[in-house]
Image (cartoon, rainbow, N blue to C red):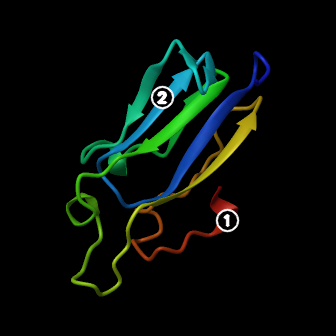
């Protein structure tokens, strides 16, 4: 569990899937119990280029990826040339706010390379 003034921040550094990725916060979370679930972010075609990070002040954050098909849910699929699937994320538990600036896939120009001094 995190302290009361700390938060979990997930930076969406290289996010190439625009559906099926959900962030749910919980007050308590275990294999046989899940207390106070709340979906705080669901990636979609609209917010994929705007959302840089997801933050929760709850003790637990669950990230789920459920795809119907891998090909139809990706931003960059070029007929098997430089195909990029899925996502890379960076997270931290901190008493401070989100870092600025943070890197996203649009900042990296779809190259798949993000420089760690941005996050």
In the picture, the quarter occupied by the C terminus is: bottom right
**Picture coordinates of residue 48, whole percent (x, y):** 34, 49
Return the residue at label 1.
116
Judge whether 35 appears above or below 53 on screen: above
The one of 96 and 56 positioned closer to us in this rendering: 56
Depth order, front residue of 119/35: 35
Vertical arrangement, residue 72 with respect to residue 21, above or below: below
Say whether residue 80 is left or right of residue 14.
left
Q: Which sits earlier in the primary sequence, circle 2 or circle 1? A: 2
Say which residue appears at 61% left-offset and 22% top-offset. Answer: 29
The residue located at (61%, 15%) in the rendering is 27
Residue highlighted by disc 2: 24
Please, is residue 108 above or below residue 38 in the view? below
Residue most extreme to the front? 32
Secondary structure under tag 2 reads strand
Q: Quadrant of the N terminus?
A: top right
In the image: residue 6, left or right of residue 30: right
Query: Residue at the spot x=35%, y=42% of the render?
Result: 43
x and y percentages locating residue 40 in the rendered image: 44, 26
Q: Residues within 10 Å of mark 2 (few under 14, many from 20)?
A: some
**Element class at badge 1:** helix
Q: Nearer the viewer, mark 2 or mark 1?
A: 2
Residue 71 rendering spot, x and y as whole percentages: 23, 66
Q: Determine whether, in the image, residue 6 is placed left or right of residue 37.
A: right
Q: Image point 41% across, 32% down: which residue?
A: 41
Q: Classify residue 62 as left or right of residue 5.
A: left
Alpha carbons under labels 2 and 1: distance apart: 26 Å
Marks 2 and 1 close (CB-CB < 8 Å): no
């Amino acid at each position: 569990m995190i302290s009361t003034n700390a938060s979990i921040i997930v930076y969406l550094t290289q996010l190439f899937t625009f559906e099926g990725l959900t962030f749910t916060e919980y007050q308590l979370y275990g294999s046989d119990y899940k207390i106070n679930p709340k979906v705080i972010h669901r990636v979609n075609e609209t917010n994929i280029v705007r959302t840089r990070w997801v933050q929760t002040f709850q003790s637990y954050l669950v990230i789920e990826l459920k795809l119907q098909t891998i090909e139809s849910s990706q931003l960059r699929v070029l007929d098997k040339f430089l195909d990029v699937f899925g996502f890379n994320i960076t997270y931290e538990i901190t008493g401070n706010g989100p870092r600025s600036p943070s890197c996203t896939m649009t900042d990296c120009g779809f190259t798949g390379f993000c420089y760690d001094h941005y996050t």
